[in-house]
Image (tube, grey):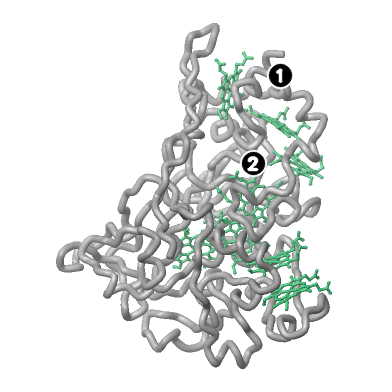
Amino acid sequence: MCIIRAREEKAMVVGRTLLAGALVVVWIVGHARLEVAAQDGGTLVLPSENVAAKGQAMGYVGPQACLRCHSDRYDDYRASGHPKKLRPASEARAWGIPLPEGWDWKDISYVIGGVRWKARFIDRQGYVITSTGPRKDRPGANQYNIETGRWVSYEAGKKKPYDCGPCHMTAYSKEGNQEGLPGMVGTWVFPGITCEECHGAGAAHAAQPDKANIKIDPSPAACGKCHIRGAPDKIPAADGFIQHHEQYNEYLAGPHAGKLGCATCHDPHKRAKVSLKKQCSDCHASTARDYAGSTMQRSGVRCVDCHMPPAGKSAESFGKYVGDVKTHIVKISIGLTDRMFSEDGQFATGKLTVDFACLRCHGSRDTGWALANARAIHTRGK
Ligand code: HEC
Ligand code: HEC
Ligand code: HEC
Ligand code: HEC
Ligand code: HEC
Ligand code: HEC
Ligand code: HEC
Ligand code: HEC
């Protein structure tokens, strides 16, 4: 049995003093971060998925059946977030995730997430838990944030059905209530996003493997089914940050739309951090050559630090311009009138501005300074 526990990642501390002005650059990128990670070489052993009669009738076999012939894919996948999106309490308790105050594992049916950003909990009736405390009647403190270990409030005190199925499950159907629990909206074949959510029902393929009887859809739209919020041509925002699960909305607003897909950069079976098949410099070789040897390159500032800053927020923010989800808008806009958000703050404009790209590190500077220095940035100090 494998026990998961929070592990402190090596903090990359590069706090330095700028030579001329003796101003301190606050380096927030690599602040110490807690992340749930597995003990045994970074992988998590999931117990076998029981294929219920319904799944069987629909031609589903479960990831264990794929493991037999695709063990490499399976090992990557089981260490990633997709399959763990919703796990029964009996499994999740082995991960070392704490419970909300007043709640015991016997009162929990499922845990939602808890792999990368945050965990929420579902009671025995299928409702998302929104009240905590000794008598379970105190609204809030119901969401556990992994990076900080804080308990924060989500839909505090409300009666909150679990209606998140389309993006969190395998073979979701909006009819009925899973396991007859009144709070569970809809039914599914497996909890979490398993192989067959992306590749389609696999019984025929597992019995007689052939390319023709299993689906592969590498289109960004296939990932965009879940990595989206609202309409694809808008980027919803709240409290000064892009909201989470908007990678597809952002990508469509950025320069890579139509040029490369999610799966050009990511191996979809792996955790984000270790999933990159291509680096920025593989395709932008001349820019990378320009950048090599500049002051910031020598200080360890990477392409993604400026071009994919954490302008989105899932669980926590660490300053006005520091959220916890990296943006896929990628292109930095340096027009004087460019703004990150609409006047009313409801949407991002699709422009990534220098406040997010620069000021989270150069905290003592302002937008005017950043704009003045943004041009020819790749060759600064050379
Ligand atoms: C991930 C953190 C980080 C980000 C993001 C970042 N910088 Fe820097 N910057 C640094 C560090 C570290 C140094 C080097 C400080 C030192 O060596 O004293 C630096 C140095 C500089 C310098 C002085 C370099 C020189 O040659 O004199 C300028 C100007 C600068 N940054 C501008 C920017 C602008 C504009 C942006 C946004 C487009 C930006 N930085 C984004 C960390 C960052
Ligand atoms: C008995 C062994 C076996 C099992 C079980 C099996 N596969 Fe395969 N799979 C193969 C082989 C062999 C190929 C290559 C077929 C070919 O080249 O025609 C393949 C190919 C694939 C491909 C690539 C298709 C392509 O177009 O390149 C995918 C995706 C795939 N399998 C997914 C799955 C999934 C998902 C499961 C579980 C539901 C699964 N496989 C179960 C043996 C298996
Ligand atoms: C449109 C699809 C979609 C819907 C609907 C959705 N989610 Fe998610 N959710 C995602 C995606 C994609 C991610 C991961 C990417 C991100 O957050 O940017 C995520 C992440 C999460 C996480 C963090 C997981 C982790 O390991 O840190 C939690 C918790 C979560 N969602 C809970 C919910 C709950 C509760 C609901 C329903 C009330 C819900 N989600 C509805 C797509 C969705
Ligand atoms: C989130 C969606 C998703 C999940 C979950 C997923 N896959 Fe895939 N898989 C893909 C995509 C997309 C590709 C095509 C990748 C590409 O074009 O580079 C792929 C490719 C493959 C291939 C072809 C090998 C290759 O890289 O060309 C195999 C085999 C495969 N998957 C098996 C599996 C198995 C087995 C599982 C579960 C253990 C699984 N996949 C889970 C999306 C997924
Ligand atoms: C059925 C919905 C769904 C589909 C389809 C889907 N995702 Fe996800 N994805 C999620 C959810 C939900 C999470 C959050 C999982 C967690 O951490 O709890 C996630 C997490 C991720 C992560 C972070 C994983 C990690 O462990 O670090 C990456 C990267 C990712 N998805 C890429 C993709 C790509 C690429 C595709 C298309 C090939 C895709 N996803 C298709 C729902 C989906
Ligand atoms: C697989 C190849 C590929 C990879 C990997 C890639 N890009 Fe691109 N990128 C392109 C293409 C193609 C375009 C659109 C054509 C163009 O404008 O150069 C583009 C456009 C851009 C633009 C807009 C250019 C402009 O002049 O408006 C920026 C900025 C950018 N990419 C940054 C990045 C960053 C940062 C990374 C790494 C996270 C990255 N790219 C990874 C291929 C790639
Ligand atoms: C210190 C922050 C920073 C870093 C690090 C950085 N860039 Fe940029 N990049 C910018 C800014 C700001 C612009 C916009 C400059 C402009 O429009 O004149 C830009 C523009 C670009 C463009 C479009 C314009 C062009 O020059 O073609 C591409 C492509 C690009 N960067 C790729 C990269 C790649 C690849 C890396 C890593 C090798 C990288 N950048 C590292 C800040 C950065
Ligand atoms: C140009 C390459 C590129 C493309 C295209 C791309 N991504 Fe990413 N993505 C990245 C990089 C780089 C990271 C940061 C990885 C890391 O943390 O080191 C990332 C991170 C993520 C994360 C985790 C976010 C976080 O803050 O940890 C998710 C989820 C994700 N991508 C999903 C997608 C989806 C879905 C698409 C398509 C709509 C997509 N990506 C397209 C390069 C890309």
Residue behind mark 2: 351
Quadrant that contains the C terminus: top right
Query: Which corner quadrant of the image does residue 215 belong to?
Result: bottom right
Left or right of residue 208, residue 45 in this image: left
Q: Residue 342 location in percent, x, y?
A: 55, 45
Looking at the image, how many numbered discs can be counted on the residues? 2
Extreme residue toward the left, this view: 135
Considering the numbered disc 2 on the image, is that residue within a helix, a strand or a loop? loop
> Which tag is nearer the camera, tag 1 or tag 2?
1
Please tell me the numbered disc located at residue 293: 1
User: Between disc 1 and disc 2, whose residue precedes?
Assistant: 1
Above or below: residue 161 compared with residue 134: below
Q: Residue 256 location in percent, x, y?
A: 75, 48
Mark 2 is surrounded, within 10 Å at the Cα level, by few (under 14), some (14 to 19) or many (20 or more) other residues, namely: many
Q: Residue 363 location in percent, x, y?
A: 47, 25
Extreme residue toward the top, this view: 20
Q: Is mark 2 within 8 Å of ligand 7?
A: no
Quadrant that contains the N terminus: bottom left
Q: Amino acid at mark 1?
A: Gly
Front-most of 364 and 260? 260
Q: Are marks 1 and 2 in contact (CB under 8 Å)?
A: no
Residue at 72% from the left image edge and 41% from the top image edge: 279
Mark 1 is surrounded, within 10 Å at the Cα level, by few (under 14), some (14 to 19) or many (20 or more) other residues, namely: some
Residue 376 makes an appearance in the image: yes
Front-most of 66 and 334? 66
Front-most of 209 and 309? 209
Q: Residue 116 location in percent, x, y?
A: 48, 53
Residue at 54% from the left image edge and 32% from the top image edge: 355
Considering the numbered disc 1 on the image, is that residue within a helix, a strand or a loop? loop
Above or below: residue 328 compared with residue 306: below
